[in-house]
Image (cartoon, grey):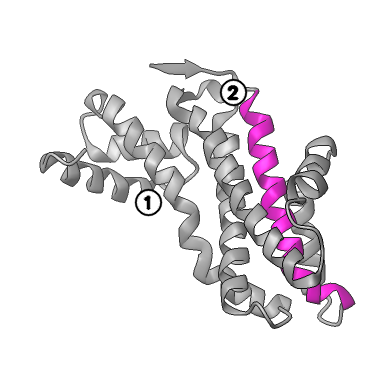
Amino acid sequence: MVIDIDEGNREIPQSSDSVLPEAASILVELSKFWDEVANRTGQDEGKFLEKVFHGMWEDNDTGDDQESILIRWAEDQSHEMQSLALIQASFTSCAHAVDAMKVQKDLKFLQAWRSISKANYWLGIVIGTWSLRKNQPESIKDFAKRGAEARHSENRALKRETMVWLDAHMVNYKSMDSAAEAIAKKVVPVAVRTARHWVGEWKKLRSTGTP
């Protein structure tokens, strides 16, 4: 069963409601990071939702707005705020998760998944960088390197959503190529080549009886 929405007459699988659990999972991980930082700096723990999430939910600043701050810092290599890049990255991840939750309420699932992808991307940078360099200030240049290593993690949720969609809709397509094109245009924000690879994986799994 699908929901027909106004945005370009796209058909989005109803299971896209999983945007909310995915966003919640991102917020949980960000909260854990925030608590570790608070513990090391003598601040109160358990304040992430109050100090960060709630403020972003009420404000009109988007994930792209938060991301633009990091871009400005990257362009100014002498910027005194570069030592706070890791904290700003956590703000960016949180803001993208908030964006996803807001547009999901309007049934704009494709847009929501784009925001989830960006939130996961920045979350990967935060967690990866923090775990490796907890006791060292992080520069924007180092941050970019961590980001390249972390980017692969953002596709996990989109791949799961694609597999669910294929279970319900592959029967309607005569070839893997046509299914891949439909996925890239209607289901998740990935390239056709990526979608085609996932369709191939789905077919192999189902041929062996793997759910």
Which span of residues is magenta-colored? Answer: 80-105
Question: Residue 196's spot in the image, x, y percent?
Answer: 31, 46
Residue at image point 71% right, 59% down:
34
Q: Residue furthest right?
A: 80
Question: Residue 142's spot in the image, x, y percent?
Answer: 65, 79
Q: Quadrant of the C terminus?
A: top left
Question: Is residue 114 at all visible to an observer of this figure?
Answer: no
Label 2 vs label 1: CA separation?
Answer: 24 Å
Residue at image point 32% right, 38% down:
163
Q: Is residue 138 left or right of residue 187?
A: right
Q: Is residue 173 left or right of residue 146?
A: left
The residue nearer to you, when weighing 43 against 107, is 43
Question: Residue 208's spot in the image, x, y percent?
Answer: 10, 43
Question: Is residue 130 at all visible to an observer of this figure?
Answer: yes
Q: Is residue 6 left or right of residue 152?
A: right
The residue nearer to you, when weighing 21 against 193, is 21
Q: Are marks 2 and 1 in contact (CB under 8 Å)?
A: no
- Residue, disc 2: 107
Task: Kindly indicate the quadrant of the structure image that contains residue 30.
Answer: bottom right
| Mark number displayed over residue 194 | 1
Location of residue 65 with respect to 125 vertically, above or below: above
Classified by dominant secondary structure, the portion drawn in magenta counts as helix
Badge 1 marks a residue whose secondary structure is helix
Q: Determine crowd level at label 2: few under 14, some 14-19, many 20+ residues with C-alpha closer than 10 A.
A: some
Q: Amino acid at mark 1?
A: Thr
Q: Amino acid at mark 2?
A: Leu
